[in-house]
């Protein structure tokens, strides 16, 4: 299995531009998470999907952020317009569920720099 | 009080020693506990999880859980320079709802194993 796939791996953009980050979860995993990681704030949960439905988006910082999961194998996180304070590494993770525990597996991340 | 607390370190141990990483959590109903390793510039990688009181061993790694004290630890025996990384403790919220799959992460402990 290829694991969780994210693209692009690096993104440099200018303030005000739209940014779209993409994620392909591990096949068979039915839950997907978007996280943001910065030195100051650590790893923060942005939004969580279960069976393609958003369950909790309370971590989305503001209306400039939106996320979709049109099918079980694809999700996007969009920032419009982007701001320098959005610079961070954005991770996608999917869950392997067993009877006893749900384990999250992370993608390689997208390093976003907003100038 | 943070929901999941870790000593940020840095923690330095000599090669071959035992490294002890600690984590406390505030939600007494938490059910599952995870340790992730994150190398600089990489994504978090699941090392192991534990959900029953006591010890769980996997190779050089031992996770210890004490729910009464709300304390979970990770021991790394025979530490190697390749173990140098940030170790993240994560806690699964209690409950049967979809949100129970969310993880709350600590800020991480930076470990350096000196050759």
Image: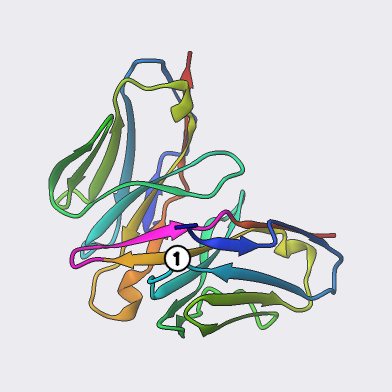
Task: Give the labeled residue for mark 1.
Answer: A26
- Count of marks overlaid on the render: 1
Spot occupied by residue A91 in the image (x, y as percentages of width and height): 56, 60
Say if B75 sits above or below A21 in the image.
above
Q: Position of residue B98 (x, y in %)?
A: 33, 79
Q: Nearer the viewer, residue A62 or A49?
A: A49
* Residue B8 shown left or right of residue B74 in the figure: right
The percent position of residue B109, horizontal first and vertical second, equals 45, 38
Secondary structure beneath label 1: loop
Q: Is residue A111 magenta?
A: no
Q: Which picture quadrant has residue A29?
A: bottom left
Q: Residue at x 60, y 56 (%)?
A: A109
Looking at the rendered image, the quarter that the N terminus of chain B falls into is bottom left
Compared to B44, does A53 lie above or below?
A: below
**Residue shown at the point (45%, 65%) measured from the top left:** A26
Relative side of A30 to A89, left or right: left
Magenta region:
A98-108
Residue B16 horizontal/vertical position (percent): 35, 15
Nearer to the camera, B1 or B14: B14
Residue drawn 70% across the image and 61% down it: A8
**Mark 1 crowdedness (10 Å alpha carbons): few <14, some 14-19, many ≥20:** many
Left or right: residue B110 compared with residue A115: left
Q: Is residue A22 above or below residue B41?
A: below
Q: Residue furthest front?
A: A1
Residue at the spot 57% in from the left edge and 76% down from the top edge: A75
Nearest the eye: B114 or A8: A8
On screen, residue A57 versus residue B91, left or right, reads right
* Host chain of mark 1: A
């Amino acid at each position: 299995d290829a694991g969780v796939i994210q693209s692009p791996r690096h993104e440099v953009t200018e303030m005000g531009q739209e940014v779209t980050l993409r994620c392909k979860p591990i096949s068979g995993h039915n839950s997907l998470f978007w996280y943001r990681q910065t030195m100051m704030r650590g790893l923060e949960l942005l939004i969580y999907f279960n069976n393609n439905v958003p369950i909790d988006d309370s971590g989305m910082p503001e209306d400039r952020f939106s996320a979709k999961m049109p099918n079980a194998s694809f999700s996007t996180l969009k920032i419009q317009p982007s701001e320098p304070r959005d610079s961070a590494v954005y991770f996608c993770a999917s869950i392997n569920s067993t009877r006893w525990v749900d384990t999250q597996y992370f993608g390689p991340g997208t390093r976003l720099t907003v100038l | 009080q943070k929901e999941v607390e870790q000593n940020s370190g840095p923690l330095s141990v000599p090669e071959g020693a035992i490294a002890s990483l600690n984590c406390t959590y505030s939600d007494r109903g938490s059910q599952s506990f995870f340790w992730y390793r994150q190398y600089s510039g990489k994504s978090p990688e699941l090392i192991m999880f534990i959900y029953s009181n006591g010890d769980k061993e996997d190779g050089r790694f031992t996770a210890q859980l004490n729910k009464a004290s709300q304390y979970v630890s990770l021991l790394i025996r025979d530490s190697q320079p390749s173990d140098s990384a940030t170790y993240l403790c994560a806690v699964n919220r209690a409950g049967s709802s979809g949100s129970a799959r969310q993880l709350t992460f600590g800020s991480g402990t930076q470990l350096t194993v000196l050759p």
